[in-house]
Amino acid sequence: MSTEDTRAGARGGAPRVLFYVQHLLGIGHLARASRIAGALVDDGFDVTMVTGGAPVPGFPGPGVRHLALPAILAGDSGFSGITDENRNPVDDAFKARRRDLLLAAYRDIRPDAVVIEAFPFGRRQVRFELLPLLEAIAAEPKRPLVLTSLRDILQERAKPGRDEESVDLVERHFDRVLVHGDPAFVRLDDTFPLAGRIAERVVYTGLVAPPLPELPEERYDVVVSAGGGAVGASLVRAARDAAVALDPALRWCLIAGPNLPEAEFAALVADTPDNVVAVRFRKDFPSLVRGARLSVSQAGYNTVCDLLRADCPALLVPFAAGGETEQTARAERLERLGLARVITEEALTAQTLAEAVGAMLSAPTRQPIGLDLDGARRTAAILRDLLQDEGDRQGLVPGH
C-alpha cells in the first residue's frame, strides 16, 4: 500500500479506523473482520485494514484500504509456533520489520479509532508488534479510541495467569470490548471467567452475519464446507463417501477450502461420484446454503452465522484438534437449542455421516431463528456513537 493510499484524511472528514487482524490457520478471523470493515465503510468510515496472514483473494473487500504485513502462519494446528510463508521459523529481524511497518502505518493514518481483532484475549503470538503499538497509542496526548473485536465464544485457557494478563491489558489500553454475539445465546462470562472485572467495557453487537442472500441459481440438497480447508480434509472425504452410500439422486456440493493441499484436492475431485461437485471455494456460499436442504460443516463462527441467516438445517463437526474448545462449545449450544446436530471429530466416519444426513433430510421443519444477526451494522453504529461522545468531551470532530 502506497503512502498516498494511506494518508490520513484522503476521504475528507470521514472518521478514520485502523483495523488490525491476524489470521494464522483458517480464514475465519479475516472473514469476520472484513464483514465488519465493510459495514464501517458503508457507514461512512475511512477504514484501513492491516492484515498479517497469508493473502486470501476477495478479502478484505471493496472500499477497504489494505496493508499486508509480511505474512506469518501457524506452525501447526495447535498454534504452538509461527513461521513465515515459506515455513521458516520467524526470527527477531522479521518481527522487528513487521513492528516497524505497523507503527509507521499508525502514524501515517492517524486514526480516530484502532480496532484490534482478538487481542489481548488471543493472538499472543503477535505481542511483539501489538504491545509497541498500544504503548505508542498510550503516549499520544489525544489518543484514538482503542477497541478489541471478539467472537462470541473464546478458547479456554490452559495456562494459569493468561486471563489475568488479558484483563490487565484491557484495563490499561482498551476503551471497549466488542463482543460479536447475542447474549441470549452466549455471554462473555460463559467462556472468560474474569469478565466481571471488565463488565463496564463490554458491548454486545449481535452476531456478524451477512445480509440475507438471494436464492441461488444452482440448488444442492447437501452443501459440505471445510472452512479454509487447512484442517477439514477428513470432513470432505467422509462426505464424499457418504454421498456414495446414500440416494444417488441427492445433489452434493463439497467445498474443500483454499488451504487444502493440492494433492488431496486432486484426489477428492478424481473420486467424486456423478452426483457430487467438488470445488475449492464458493464466494456465494451464503446463497448456496439458503437454497440447500442441509449444510454439513465445521462450527466456525462465520459458517454458523451464514447458516443462521439462511435458516439452513446444520450438521456440525466442530474442529477440536490441538485442544481447541471454541467450535465444540458453539456446536453444543446450537444443538441444545434445536438449531443443529453434532458429530464429534472422533466419531466422524462415512457411515456416521451418512446416517446423520439421512435422518436430518427426513426431519420436520425447525422453528425460526431468534438470534440477533446484525452485528456488523451494529458495530458501526456503536463506534460512531463512541467517537461522537469522545469528540463532545474533547471538542473534536472525528476525521479532522
Image: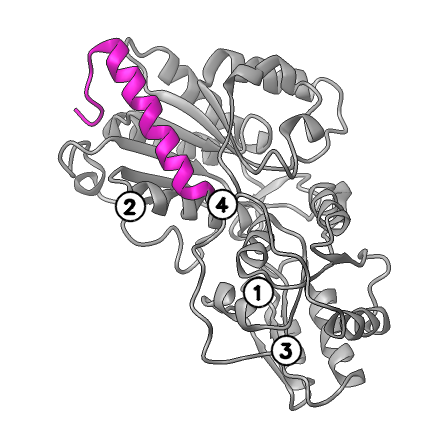
Q: Which residue matches tag 4? A: 208
| Amino acid carrying mark 3 in the image | Asp
The answer for how far apart the CA atoms under marks 3 and 4 are is 26 Å
On the rendered image, what quadrant is the N terminus found in?
top left
Query: Secondary structure under badge 2?
Result: helix
Reply above or below: 174 against 32: above
Residue sitting at 72 percent across and 89 percent down?
A: 248
The answer for how far apart the CA atoms under marks 2 and 3 are is 34 Å
Query: Secondary structure under badge 1?
Result: loop
Nearer the N terminus, badge 2 or badge 1?
2
Question: Which residues are drawn in magenta?
Answer: 375-400
Q: Which residue matches tag 3? A: 221
Contact (Cβ within 8 Å) of mark 3 with mark 4: no
Residue 392: within the magenta? yes
| Amino acid carrying mark 2 in the image | Asp
Q: Which residue matches tag 1? A: 257
Q: Residues within 10 Å of mark 2 (few under 14, many from 20)?
A: few
The answer to whether residue 68 is seen in the rendering is no
The answer for how far apart the CA atoms under marks 3 and 1 are is 19 Å
Q: Nearer the viewer, mark 3 or mark 1?
A: 3
Q: Which residue matches tag 2? A: 42
The answer for how far apart the CA atoms under marks 4 and 2 are is 15 Å
Nearer the N terminus, badge 1 or badge 4?
4
The answer for how far apart the CA atoms under marks 2 and 1 are is 28 Å
Residue 194 percent coordinates (x, y): 67, 18
Reply above or below: 169 against 34: above
Residue 102 percent coordinates (x, y): 37, 32
Q: Nearer the viewer, mark 2 or mark 1?
A: 2
| Amino acid carrying mark 4 in the image | Val
Q: Specify how the rendered protein is coloured.
A: one colour
Q: Residues within 10 Å of mark 1 (few under 14, many from 20)?
A: many
